[in-house]
Amino acid sequence: MKPRNLAILLSAGLALAAAGCGSGSGSTPDAKSSQGSAAPANAPVSITVGCQPPKSNPKERSEWDADVASFQKLHPNITIVSKDAFPCIVPETFQAKLAGGEMEDMYYVYYTDAQKIIAAGQAADISPYINSITTLKDIRPDVMSIFKSGDKVYGLPRTNYSTGLVYNRKLFTQAGLNPDTPPTTWAEVQAAAKKIAAIGPGYVGYGEYSAGNTGGWHFTSALYGRGGEVVGPDGKTAAFNSPQGKAVLDNLKTMRWTDNSMGTKQLLRWEDLMRMMGSGKLGMMIGAPDVVQAVNNDFKGKFDDYGVAALPEATTSLSGGDGYMFNPKATPDQIKAGLQWLEYRFLTPGQGQFNYERAKADGLPVGLPTTDLYGTAAPGIKMNELRTQFATVPVEHFKSYVDGAAKVQFKLEPPKAQEIYAVLDTAMSAILTRQDANIDQLLSDAEKKVNSVLAKSS
């Protein structure tokens, strides 16, 4: 997954309709199978699958195509028809594709949209068939819950990641800090930021977003890490005007105005921090491992100079990811075939997306902990062993992140995320641009606005 899309994945949701996509859109596989006799075992079946890597990404596309060929050799009765629309999801056309019957039999989704799709009757219930997945019992329960409603399952994950602390190891060394022992508390982050900023003019110890909804997104990440909530359990009231919410803003206010460790340029967006990190002048920021890949590929950084640590003090972490769901019109045989492909391509250590030996031979970066589907279960351990064995980047630079991700509880974005983030941007930008900003007043004002946003969706 491209790092730029990471920010989009964590902060964007589709505006899906609450209603189904047609009178037959809520059909389940069981209903379909009752309409006629089941197909003979090993009968030919063809299934369309979304999100084939685009031609602009030739190495990953070649690996996908090679996997299709190998899979079809193992299963001669199954034909995988790959669809490479890029980006894999276009919010403006998603509903139209479902309603018009143009959606793939097995289609790609972001985590943030799965529950809306289920509620709208736009995904098939795959519960009767998922026991064929040998690693099913090992997939993290918090990840599987994304695709479940009650006891029914409507999809499976492809990738999963959480936020951590991205830091410049070179600057840590230059500031007299140990890059092998990154901060584990926000007090340590503050202290490290002061030392990095003291290196000289232009150096920024800690960077933060505050524009384009990215400030609200990072506020949410920091809040979750402290055990706070953006929205209450009823989904109707804001919950961030809390001790945890105040701690997030108070910490930023101290670093910005007392320590002067955040630089004077604020109202930053995604590209701004990437550019600063790539220039070698930014010490730390909240982010996932894909940030390191973006900095290396697009902003002139070097893999060797960066590390990712666990989010300080976190027991809960904002997560993101994607997966696949099935068109309600898919037949039972198509669902079974699609699940076999999913297992082959996305869920098995050592093959498909986890064929690190092949990725290394193809010149793709290996070693970044970009997907955590299994935690400390056996498949997860095996994947990390292979990732280390064939690494082309220094995996030890991400040990703190990997260890921390295995312990935290993953938590998705709040409902109405984009609208809420826009409101929280105001609080974040005020703290970072006005020395006299009042934290209590900012959170109170934001709370009222978010309650209004949530009331409109009730």
Image (spheres, rainbow, N blue to C red):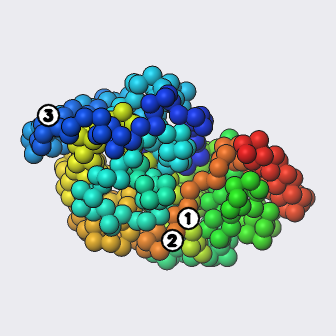
- Give the residue type that dot 1 points to: Ser
For the residues bearing labels 1 and 2, Cβ distance under 8 angstroms: yes
**Given this view, does label 3 or label 1 mark the residue nearer the observer?**
3
For the residues bearing labels 3 and 1, Cβ distance under 8 angstroms: no
Q: Tell me, yes or no, if residue 174 can be seen here.
A: no
- Give the residue type that dot 2 points to: Val
Q: Quadrant of the C terminus?
A: top right
Q: Earlier in the sequence, mark 1 or mark 2?
A: 1
Residue 45, horizontal then vertical, whole percent? 18, 34
Q: Earlier in the sequence, mark 2 or mark 3?
A: 3
The residue to which callout 3 is attached is 44
For the residues bearing labels 2 and 3, Cβ distance under 8 angstroms: no
Q: Going by the image, does 320 lie left or right of 254?
A: left
Q: Residues within 10 Å of mark 2 (few under 14, many from 20)?
A: some
Residue 9, horizontal then vertical, whole percent? 52, 45
Q: Earlier in the sequence, mark 3 or mark 1?
A: 3
Q: Tell me, yes or no, if residue 130 can be seen here.
A: yes
Q: CA distance from mark 1 to mark 2?
A: 6 Å
The residue to which callout 2 is attached is 408
> Residue drawn at (30%, 39%), measured in percent from left and top?
34
Residue 275, horizontal then vertical, whole percent? 56, 45
Residue 203 position by quadrant: bottom right
- Give the residue type that dot 3 points to: Pro
